[in-house]
Amino acid sequence: MDHFGSFATLAATPYLIGFLALCFWWRWWLLVPAGLVAAVLAKIEYASVNASDGAGAAFGIILVIFAMIGAASGFVASGVVLIGRMTRLQALRAVYVLPVVFIFGFGSYFAVTWTQQKIREARYAPPSAACLDNLHPARIADVAIAIPVAPGILLFGDGMSDDHYILWSNPDARAFCSEADGGNATLKSVVFTLDGSPSRREMETKRPFCSRPHPEYPWAEMACHLIPTDVIPDKPVKMTVSVKAPGFDPLVREREAMLKNQAIVTSDGLRTYRSKNDIYLLRPDGYFARCHDHRSKIQPWLSCTATEELSDKLAISYDFRSTAELFMRQSVTVAGNARAIFDSLRP
């Protein structure tokens, strides 16, 4: 409350100056030009203060904003007084209008700010317990799945490109629960993001899903805990299951790009194709992945991406960490775990 009082006192001075500057122009031919000049000056001053980056920039912005609000309130007060004089309404006399407009004008900023805060709180309020605790039915292609509201899950609806649900976002989680529980959740893509920047992942891992163990989901541990940068997990760090476009094979283009390069074959049959920025690793059984070498001490592994057919209508693509030495056996384990992650959503 003390902070609010200090802020109100700080704001009152520029507001009063702005109000007094325009509240006594009781001729239309004076008020309109004065209002236009004040608007131009306010725009110039606000742009100047907003472009500054010094320690007093925030202070200056507050002063300018309240001076602008005061000037606008003074302009309105003068206009109302002029209307009162034209209509001879006693209620619109200056002695009544000026204090009323002064008070309401000054309070308008705080009223709008309070309203915006309440709207923001309502928008980002946690979903209901039923939304957080229950499984929500959906379909992707011809496969029925049941999806928990969990961190790391991103869903794309079978509609416009912006029809998506980030399940660690409260508004999106509520929207998805409503859509799914109404029986209308048809998806074109399900994405598991089990790795990411520490700041974003910390926000995700505080979700209610992570407050209890979930042995039924092989991905829950990775979704709820940060993955150390020096660890090479046996599960994908990102996985996408999506509906295949008719007549499009996602493997053809990658395989063609890989085979344009010269292969280096190791004793165990692993073929390595090096392009400008990527490395392609091909197992003897035909499985291959495109990898990127970070050449970094803090990321001492390859970032690999593999794509496979999950069914005649679905494709699965997943990112995982590996090394050339581990790839032969580790890629088999990761591929199996990627499929297990999707299978865990089947009811």
Image (cartoon, rainbow, N blue to C red):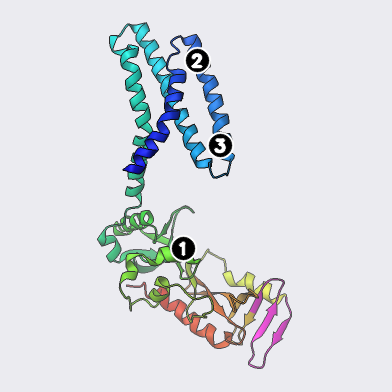
Quarter of the figure with the N terminus: top left
Q: Which residues are magenta?
A: 261-280
How far apart are labels 2 and 1 at the CA level? 51 Å
The label number, if any, that marks residue 32 in the structure image? 2
**Residue at image point 60% right, 82% down:** 323
Does residue 11 belong to the magenta stretch?
A: no
How far apart are labels 1 and 3 at the CA level? 32 Å
Judge depth for marks 2 and 3 and give the one in front.
3
- Which mark sits nearer the N-terminus, 2 or 1? 2
For disc 3, the marked residue is: 49
Write down the quadrant of residue 139 in the picture. bottom left
Q: Residues within 10 Å of mark 2 (few under 14, many from 20)?
A: some
**Residue at image point 43% right, 63% down:** 154
The amino acid marked with disc number 1 is: Arg
Q: Looking at the image, which is closer to me, 178 or 195? A: 195
The answer to whether residue 199 is above or below residue 23 is below
